Amino acid sequence: MLTVTNLVYTDSLHDVSLDHLTGLFAHWGSPPAPEAILRIFQGSGRVILARDGQKGPVIGYITAITDGVSTAYIPHLEVRAEWQGQGIGSELVRQMVEQLNHIYAIDLMCDPELQPFYAKQGFRAWTGMLIRNYDRQSCA
């Protein structure tokens, strides 16, 4: 585990280069390329990044898609494996929920093993439906 001494949380994509995004989505079978990750960030209604310094690599992030009035959906939360266990993911969720707290519904889908983490952040388990096109997982 690496310890972050200069951790910065920001909603700015300014100074984010493709090099800062290399290695994200590493746990996916077919991860998106840095160019696709940047497009994901740019296309999200909200994004919060955890960076190693003002201009350092992105070590974690959370995104939300929202109408700004009634609903929001959190599709992505990731902290690089070597920085996990330091509360970075919890802080990203806390900041995003704080930004969206005026909205009626804040939803997300997660694997069952992640439900305890999200329960600690105030989320409740619910039933949902989904379609997954794994042949498009790389966003290419």
Image: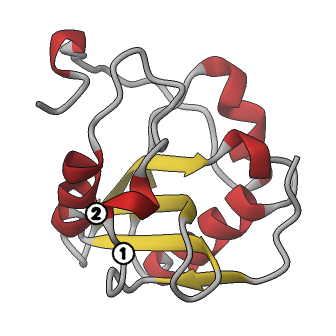
Coloration mode: secondary structure
Q: Residues within 10 Å of mark 2 (few under 14, many from 20)?
A: many
Does residue 131 lie above or below 102 as drawn?
Answer: above
Q: Is residue 78 left or right of residue 72?
A: right
**Residue at point 88% right, 46% down?**
1
What residue is disc 2 on?
41
Q: Amino acid at mark 1?
A: Val
Does residue 67 lie above or below 18 as drawn?
Answer: below
**Residue at point 51% right, 84% down?**
55
What residue is disc 1 on?
16
Q: Is residue 98 left or right of residue 4?
A: left
Q: Is label 2 in a helix, a strand or a loop?
A: helix
Q: Is residue 20 left or right of residue 52?
A: left
- Of mark 1 and mark 2, the one earlier in the sequence is 1
Q: Quadrant of residue 46?
A: bottom left
Count of numbered circles on the image: 2
Q: Are marks 1 and 2 in contact (CB under 8 Å)?
A: yes
Nearer-the-camera pick, 94 or 80: 80
Residue 93, percent from left and from top: 61, 63
Residue 97, percent from left and from top: 55, 71
**Residue at point 56% right, 47% down?**
78
Nearer-the-camera pick, 102 or 11: 11
Residue 140, percent from left and from top: 11, 30
**Residue at point 28% right, 63% down?**
41
Q: Is label 1 in a helix, a strand or a loop?
A: loop
Q: Quadrant of residue 100?
A: bottom left
Q: Residues within 10 Å of mark 1 (few under 14, many from 20)?
A: some
Residue 96, percent from left and from top: 52, 72
Q: Amino acid at mark 2?
A: Phe
